Image (tube, grey):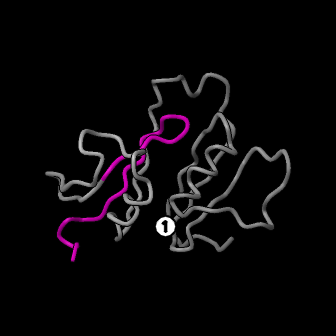
């Protein structure tokens, strides 16, 4: 895995089921290099090849209470509509589609296997 640039920030996300979480984030473009795959591992480093990194770790007992997950992530991606089309009915919210928000983002939201809120968006002013 390539090193992160100086000043980069990577989220370390606790998960109850690493395999389910890894599969979910792979659909968002985050994968683990084959060379890093070891049976029984409890920490996984994923990247999207565009400078995005996400580390998954086994949740410590009682970190993740069903229905009360305090964690959230934001994925900046230019092709919001394309990603939304691939994820379809998994989008949460009334419209089940990306929307222009008052805070200047065109986005949609998902919930990962542990109910982590994942927003996917791009600044409205930069949309073509």
Point 62% across, 53% down: residue: 55
Expressed as whole percent of the image width and height from the top left, the position of residue 45 reads 67, 57
Who is closer to the viewer here, 63 or 96? Answer: 96
Q: Is residue 93 left or right of residue 52?
A: left
Query: Residue 114 appears in which quarter of the rendering?
Result: top right
- State whether residue 58 is above or below residue 120: above
Point 14% across, 51% down: residue: 102
Is the C terminus in the top left, top right, bottom left or bottom right quadrant? bottom left
Badge 1 marks a residue whose secondary structure is: loop
Expressed as whole percent of the image width and height from the top left, the position of residue 105 reads 23, 58
Point 27% across, 55% down: residue: 98
- So how many labels did they put on this image? 1
Q: Is residue 115 left or right of residue 42?
A: left
- State whether residue 79 is above or below residue 46: below
Residue farthest toward the bottom in the current orientation of the protein: 128
User: Would residue 119 be counted in the magenta stretch?
Assistant: yes
Span of residues in magenta: 108-128
Residue farthest toward the right in the current orientation of the protein: 39
- State whether residue 28 is above or below residue 3: above
Who is closer to the viewer here, 11 or 39? Answer: 39
User: Would residue 118 be counted in the magenta stretch?
Assistant: yes
Who is closer to the viewer here, 54 or 81? Answer: 81
Q: Is residue 39 left or right of residue 48?
A: right
**What crowding class fits label 1: few (fewer than 14 Cα within 10 Å), some (14-19), or many (20 or more)?**
few
Expressed as whole percent of the image width and height from the top left, the position of residue 74 reads 39, 53
The residue that disc 1 covers is 7
Expressed as whole percent of the image width and height from the top left, the position of residue 37 reads 79, 58
Is the N terminus in the top left, top right, bottom left or bottom right quadrant? bottom right
């Amino acid at each position: 895995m390539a090193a992160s640039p100086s000043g980069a920030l990577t989220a370390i996300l606790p998960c109850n089921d690493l395999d389910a979480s890894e599969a979910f984030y792979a659909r968002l473009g985050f994968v683990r290099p084959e060379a890093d795959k070891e049976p029984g591992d409890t920490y996984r480093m994923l990247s999207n090849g565009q400078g995005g990194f996400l580390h998954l770790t086994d949740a410590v007992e009682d970190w993740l209470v069903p229905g009360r997950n305090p964690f959230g992530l934001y994925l900046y991606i230019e092709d919001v509509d394309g990603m939304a089309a691939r994820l379809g009915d998994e989008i949460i919210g009334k419209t089940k589609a990306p929307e222009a928000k008052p805070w200047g983002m065109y986005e949609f939201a998902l919930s990962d296997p542990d109910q982590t809120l994942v927003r996917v968006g791009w600044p409205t002013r930069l949309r073509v």
